[in-house]
Image (cartoon, rainbow, N blue to C red):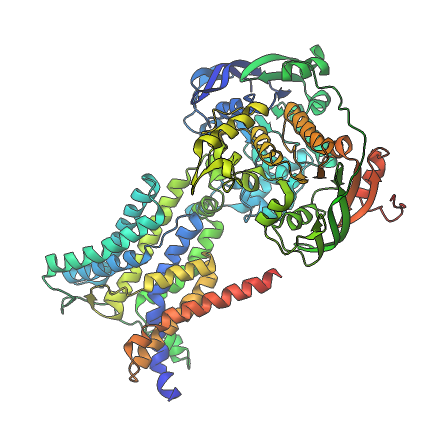
Amino acid sequence: MLDLLFDSSFAASVPRFVTPILLAALGGALCERAGVFNIALEGFILVGAFFAVLGSYFTGSPWFGALAAILAGIGMGLIFAEFNLRRGGDPIVVSIAINLLAAGLTTYLLRAIFDVIGAFTDPNIVGFRPIKVPVIESIPLLGPILSGQPILFYVALAAVPAVHYFLARHRLGLRMRAAGENAAALQAGGVSPQKVRLWALVACGMLCGLAGAQLSIANVSLFVENMSAGRGWIAVVAVLLTRGRPLPLFLIAVIFGAVDSFSFRVQGLGLAQQFTDMMPYLATLLMLVGLSWWRRRQEV
Amino acid sequence: MRVALSGITVRFGELMAVDDVSLTIEPGEIHAILGENGAGKTTLMNALFGLVRLAAGTITIDGTERRWSSPQDAIRAGLGMVHQHFMLQDTMTVLENIVLCAEPVGRLGFVDFATARRRLHEKAETHGISLPLGRQVGALSVGEKQVVEILKLLYRDAEVLILDEPTSVLTPEEKDRLFSVLRSFRAEGKAIVLITHKLDEVMESADRVSVMRGGRLVSSSPLAATSKERIGREIIGGELPSPRTRGEYRPGETVLSVEGLRIASRAGSVGPISFEVRAGEILGIAGVSGNGQAELVQALVGLKRPLSGEIALFGRRLDTLDIAARRRIGMSYIPEDRQRTGLALAATVSENANAGREDARAYTRGPFLNRAAMARFARGLIDRYRIRVAGPHARAATMSGGNKQKLVVGRELARATPLTIAENPTWGVDIGAMDFIHGELMRMRDEGHAVLLVSTELDEILALSDRILVMYEGRIAGEVAGREADRERIGRLMTSRAEALPEVA
């Protein structure tokens, strides 16, 4: 029984689930650190997923698909910035609006452009191929996990130290942290916190766009309505749990990814889908409880 | 660098915060700007710094008229300001705080911390400043935080340094160190503007004194050409208050009793602490900031649950009751932090003045608030305490620090409860307001109420207290009767050499 659950193909599938959560959460982390309460990651991802398919379908290249996803993500970031930063809209209201907009927009475009309802699949959608990494491939146990994954998995892995280093050492990273912690001080220093936050939203849009691309043109080669399926929310939880610190974020994303993958797996064993779908959220709850218990112990 | 202000005028709605002020800031001079809270000192400097819009007037630097579109312009021109409330990032290191907004960048926009460190070392050394650059700012003492702020200015090569109430949070030694650094700056030809209301410091260190009152400039003259008495009169626009006379000390029944109280704190725990406060007395708790006073007060008012021990008001146990219940039984609280604990800054003056009275019959109409009665009460406080604000419906945030404090004191003392707990009640407040607040606390005592005064200002403790407890490292280091209190004895108790001294019962 356990062998069935935890075989090597299970291990190899984990990165596919980790990647979108990790990419989106890193984007969310930038917003969190810069003081933008962005819980619209779900919508950002969904739009990214759609445009990845669109780009790939019309150009025949997954690279252009990813580029389209990035641009679409940036567009979503700019919409958020316009309503939250410039017009002073409440970030929760703006987030809800953007999540609803993303769901409606992708459904509408699916119909308007491809003339389908529900799902769009076509041989012209070219997805990313798995990449075999020569030496790592032959490592026992880790080999099938770290090798043979689509490019975006490696991008996500590289993005963890990159975002960490960016926040620690880059001028804009420093200013983002300042905007998140004491924006008045940043302002008094002559730097506009809003401009800094705009960059955080742009970067978040890019990363979420890639997260969407991973879902639609790397894991599969198709677009399904609402295919982000709560991963943006899981990413939000990961960001809040870790207060936007990239390294712990990586750990949390791996755990969530593994649970996500696991829930897929047990579905194949005949467990009710309604139950398996709950698993990522149960894991979230457990982690929230565990973390607050641990923090309270730290305080005493 | 010579800065000339001419005809500067700033309006906040109907309030003329600064009214046609002209003065010159000369290089190589310490220029003190004195005045009561709300006299417009800070606003004038904010205007010079490009933080508020000018209704009229010009700023001239070295003969050329300048206009700022943002503070960044003023910083580039060589102006630097240390705000009264520090502008620091607590989770960042000292070095990160200093370079923020003026980062030296290397490849791809990454910050070149090595260069910054080198540059800073040179500058700091010439003025005899040392600070661990890698420490987190949140872990520093208030005095050290101020040094970070000064290093920020030094790093940016500021030629004109504006310091807003720089000494209100410092210990005496820190104060001395600050002034020696400022004198070193002066020797280098920098201009230093000191916004303050502490006359003694001005007499010791300033070269030129300007006095503001009600938004206008009253006088601006070299220190040698004026006197302490004259400046004092100019500040308040009349004679200085005479020393206070106090009624006879006749302690009544025990109001508050604390027995074996222990409270958790960041450094471990505070206590055990035992003491009593009786009706008709002011019990002063002296001590250097951070020796457990904050935890003690939090436990008394109910903001923090003690680890063990008893708190009783008129013999009734309080330690299991919540804040509202304690206040109902007879406790008022003037908190140290008026910005966060004392007031809701986004709410109006009227709403703040009536906080805690939402249930009182006089201020409600059935389930609704009686706005008119609330405003009437607020207006009463504004008149009685001479609070400078546009009106009861202005936001609390629009008041200056001293006026905020007056509002808090007024709200709490109007309740006339048997016990008042006052925590640094005149922190950052001008002479006039301080005198008034002291008078109010004394009135409470003379009317037979109990007052617990927790203060780090020894002068305040000595001026008001009937009995004095000194706290050191979370415990009561000793007790001194108010009348026989001498500074040195309390000073010794405040700095650990307490065990050697016999206790005075």
User: In the displayed structure, does residue B257 sit left or right of residue A234?
Assistant: right
Image quadrant in which you'd find residue A215: bottom left
Question: Residue B331: x and y, percent?
Answer: 64, 43
Choose between A13 and B107: the one closer to the eye: A13
Residue sitting at the far left: A115
Q: Quadrant of the C terminus of chain A?
A: bottom right
Note whether B48 is above or below B411 in the view shown: above
**From where the camera sits, is residue B223 visible?**
yes
Question: Residue A232: x and y, percent?
Answer: 33, 61
User: In the displayed structure, does residue B225 sit left or right of residue B24?
Assistant: right
Image quadrant in which you'd find residue B419: top right
Could you tell me which residue is drawn at 62 percent across and 39 percent down?
B336
Note whether A22 is above or below B148 in the view shown: below
Could you tell me which residue is drawn at 49 percent across and 52 percent down?
A168
Could you tell me which residue is drawn at 45 percent across and 28 percent down?
B73
Q: Quadrant of the N terminus of chain A?
A: bottom left
**From where the camera sits, is residue B28 visible?**
no
Note whether B370 is above or below B430 in the view shown: below
Question: Residue B342: x and y, percent?
Answer: 57, 39
Choose between B328 and A21: the one closer to the eye: B328
Residue sitting at the far bottom: A1
Note whether B61 is above or below A25 in the view shown: above
Question: Residue B10: x and y, percent?
Answer: 46, 20
Could you tell me which residue is drawn at 22 percent across and 58 percent down?
A103
User: In the displayed structure, does residue A9 sit left or right of residue A126?
Assistant: right
User: In the displayed structure, does residue B140 sit left or right of residue A234?
Assistant: right
Image quadrant in which you'd find residue B450: top right
